[in-house]
Amino acid sequence: MMENEIDRELLEKIADMLGKPVGAFNIRKDSGCDGRQSTEHIQITSKEDGKSGIDIRIQDGTVGETCHIPVIITKPGIQEMVYNDFYIGENCDVNIVAGCGIHNCGDQESRHDGLHTFYVGKNSHVKYTEKHYGDGDGKGGRVMNPQTVVYLEEGASIQMETVQIRGIDSTKRDTKIVCGKGAEAIVTERLLTHGDQTAESDMEIVLDGEGSRGRVISRSVAQDTSSQVFYPRMVGNAQCFGHVQCDSIIMGDAKIKSIPAITANCTEAQLVHEAAIGKIAGDQLLKLETLGLTPEEAEECILKGFLA
Amino acid sequence: MLELKHISYSVREGDGELGILNDISLTIDDHRLVVFTGPNGGGKTTLAKVIMGLVTPTSGQILWNGQDITALSITERARLGISYGFQQPPRFKGLTVRDLLTLASGDKKLSKDKCCQYLTRVGLCANDYLDREVDVSLSGGEVKRIEIASILARNGSLMIFDEPEAGIDLWSFARLTETFEQIHRTGSATMIIISHQERIISLADEVIVVGDGTIRHRGAAADILPKILADTLGGCPVLTKEVAAQ
């Protein structure tokens, strides 16, 4: 596993990885495998159907283990489509850390598209974190289009956290989660765009099973001339509870479109949505200034808290 | 020492000017507890905001410990020890009570014990509140008490409180007046409190009645309270005039 300064910085930003990770991991670098480790309970293998990507199989009853699968792109002009499938057994409690970092100092576009599919077995809990980060001073664009599909069996749950703070020029995120009986999906999305970046997030949570629950918390900040579109949808097909909450701070000449939708196909479905877009309130800035912060520090503090 | 010299503030209204503060001069010595009181719309809050820099006066001069601070920003005044508790404090999505107290104190490693002390002094339990966000999930009274705790954490040499009692229940109010009394007794700060509460007024070294943008009366609480009561109209002034005319 060859690591240089750029690799180390990217890995730390997207996966909080300092040195060699503990437990199962797969590091994908510039479309190749730069390191892999399976454990007794978590097996990582390359796909055998000709597609690019890996299969991750987690045994029944695996508890307290973490699996890191970061992707880094350090050469300009790389375009890839990756398929990663997660087969999580029953009664597991695992932490999966994905993420993609692009360092582009060339003039050609670097692009990572990925489809992650999770099959989460009965009564298993998965915490899934996905961070996106881009840097490099090249003119080439840094593009990421992640798709996530999750199937939750009876009593299973996923806590999905996605973070994209600066650096990615264009992103279109697609998320679909199907909840079985008593299953729960909690999705937290954090996004900051600046310059002329564009970001689109399309999400659908289908509450199919009785007693299933869904919660989407989306917080975003759009600065400069960037634009964002959110389309979170919650569909209730049984006795269930769903809540969608989208909050955005708009700055400069940015544009934000937020279109939450709730659909009930059952009289016992209880669905709520809230959406708000607004600039930083003047009284918030003034309050922090009275605590000794400069207007710039106050703004940074408000944004940091909002996206924390 | 705080000195206000010929402070006036007016706003544009149609073609003319509407005077909010009219030539106010005032000196407040160190470690004094001064209460601004008077009718709504009389200029109390505007006067307090002028001191913090939240409102820029049309004319006049403000001196703090001999330094002319008239042209200084809010931030610069805050760094000179002036602090301000808002009547209606803003809420922050994502900022916790601990974050706010930490920012206020300027100590990035503010201990839980310290936070606990500030919150106890406004009648809140740290365990229940430290990790809560200062957002709409808190009631008006809770946000108000956290605001006051943030001023205690700031530990400035001039503390301005705009109607600290508004929205606070009776039990917490009693705790709050004890806190004001304690700050005053230990001489740790000069305090300006905008209030209509007799109990707070009675704590003051000096009461300043602000009305129609001027200082109407000033003096000891015992002397001023009867004047306030005498000025208080029991009914509708229009109706009173009509009755008087008959």
Image (tube, coloured by chain):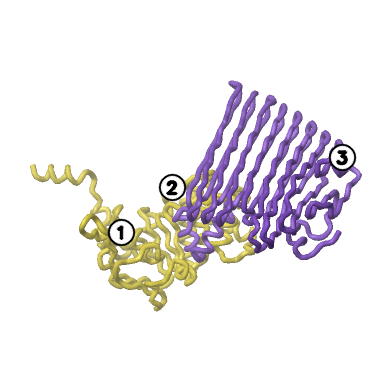
Chain B shown in which color?
Answer: yellow
| Label 2 SS | loop
Residue kind at label 2, given as amino acid type: Gly
Query: Residue B59 got which mark?
Result: none
Q: In the figure, the purple chain has which letter?
A: A
As helix, strand or loop, the secondary structure at mark 1 comes to: loop
Chain to which mark 3 belongs: A
Q: Outermost residue toward the left?
A: B246
Residue occupying image coordinates x 31% and y 63%: B208
The Cα–Cα distance between marks 2 and 1, rounded to whole angstroms, is: 21 Å
Reading the image, the residue beneath label 1 is B43
Return the residue found at the far bottom.
B66
- Residue at horizontal 79 percent and vertical 54 percent from the top: A29
Nearer the observer: mark 3 or 2; the answer is 3
Q: Quadrant of residue A214?
A: top right
Mark 3 crowdedness (10 Å alpha carbons): few <14, some 14-19, many ≥20: few
Mark positioned earlier in the residue sequence (2 or 1): 1
Image coordinates for residue B221, horizontal then vertical, percent: 33, 61
Of A267 and B176, the residue lying toward us? A267
Q: Residues within 10 Å of mark 2 (few under 14, many from 20)?
A: some
